[in-house]
Amino acid sequence: MNTEPKRKFGVVVVGVGRAGSVRMRDLRNPHPSSAFLNLIGFVSRRELGNIDGVQQISLEDALSSQEVEVAYICSESSSHEDYIRQFLNAGKHVLVEYPMTLSLAAAQELWELAEQKGKVLHEEHVELLMEEFAFLKKEVVGKDLLKGSLLFTAGPLEEERFGFPAFSGISRLTWLVSLFGELSLVSATLEERKEDQYMKMTVCLETEKKSPLSWIEEKGPGLKRNRYLSFHFKSGSLENVPNVGVNKNIFLKDQNIFVQKLLGQFSEKELAAEKKRILHCLGLAEEIQKYCCSRK
């Protein structure tokens, strides 16, 4: 991206919640990757008119417009699959916030569609661009894991909008897979008290070397957004991550990666490895959901 842009890709942002608002801000600010992009407008189910001078446009206009070449899908997870399919069929490149779909089969089908259309389909994973993850990656390299656990707590989240907890929490699963390689499911349980808006999902996984990893998602009123981890290696232990600095511009860093893909600056090998990891995580999430639902 050190080159001057010969052209700009017209972008529409679909969904203007937290992620969509950050995406619009980054598109409008002078950054190296933003120089290759031109924000045309946004799509929202709410009637907003315009936001800071950016015009609201209808979904139909976004799909049919020759100006729009790229869609950023920042809506709730349950709508991702439908939006991705519509924009790919309309010949647009797609950036989507994780999870791209709520089933493995849908993700595989959409990737095939993107390849048929010759378009970029990029699933955002800002958790891999965090300072904490960079610290962990350095800490675990070359070490033999004996056992580990990752607990995430947060306020309630609507499953109808954001998917089963294994999908809405897929960024934690992505951390574990990125740190320790492909994982297999041993067991999973889901405890729910819907009247209290409380849920706790406990997942037992194992690495290819049969080292156990537990992943827990606990959500309910009064629970603060927090991550607790514990990894035990042959050479010592790691209990939680020290304060390693502020996560600056992680959505912008993700946009930089997307623009590199638009410009053909990623190798086939890199793209294949990323796709393999994403599909592995979506497949695991689906397996966890089926395991929990079969035991209800």
Image (cartoon, rainbow, N blue to C red):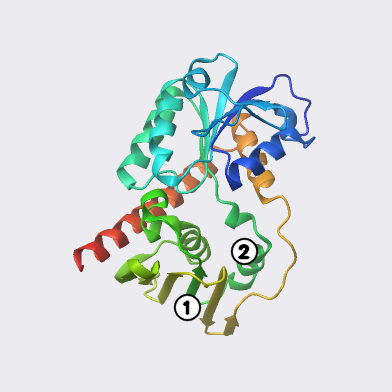
The relative height of residue 175 versus residue 94 in the rendered view (above or below) is below
Q: What residue is at 30 percent from the left and 43 percent from the top?
A: 105
**Quarter holding residue 80:** top left
Local secondary structure at mark 2: helix
Apparent side of residue 228 relative to residue 114 in the rendered image (left or right): right
Apparent side of residue 247 relative to residue 183 in the rendered image (left or right): right
* Percent position of residue 79, x then y: 41, 39
- Whole-Å distance between the Cαs marked 2 and 1? 15 Å
Give amino acid for label 2: Phe
Residue wearing tag 2 = 133
- Crowdedness of circle 1 by 10 Å Cα count: few (<14), some, many (20+)? many
Q: Is residue 38 visible?
A: no
Local secondary structure at mark 1: strand
- Report the quarter where the C terminus lies: bottom left
Give amino acid for label 1: Gly
* Percent position of residue 22, x then y: 66, 44
Q: Is residue 227 visible?
A: yes
The relative height of residue 240 versus residue 138 in the rendered view (above or below) is below
- Report the quarter where the N terminus lies: top right
Q: How many marks?
A: 2
Residue wearing tag 1 = 148
* Percent position of residue 71, x then y: 54, 30
Name the residue nearer the viewer: 132 or 280.
Answer: 132
Earlier-in-chain disc, 2 versus 1:
2
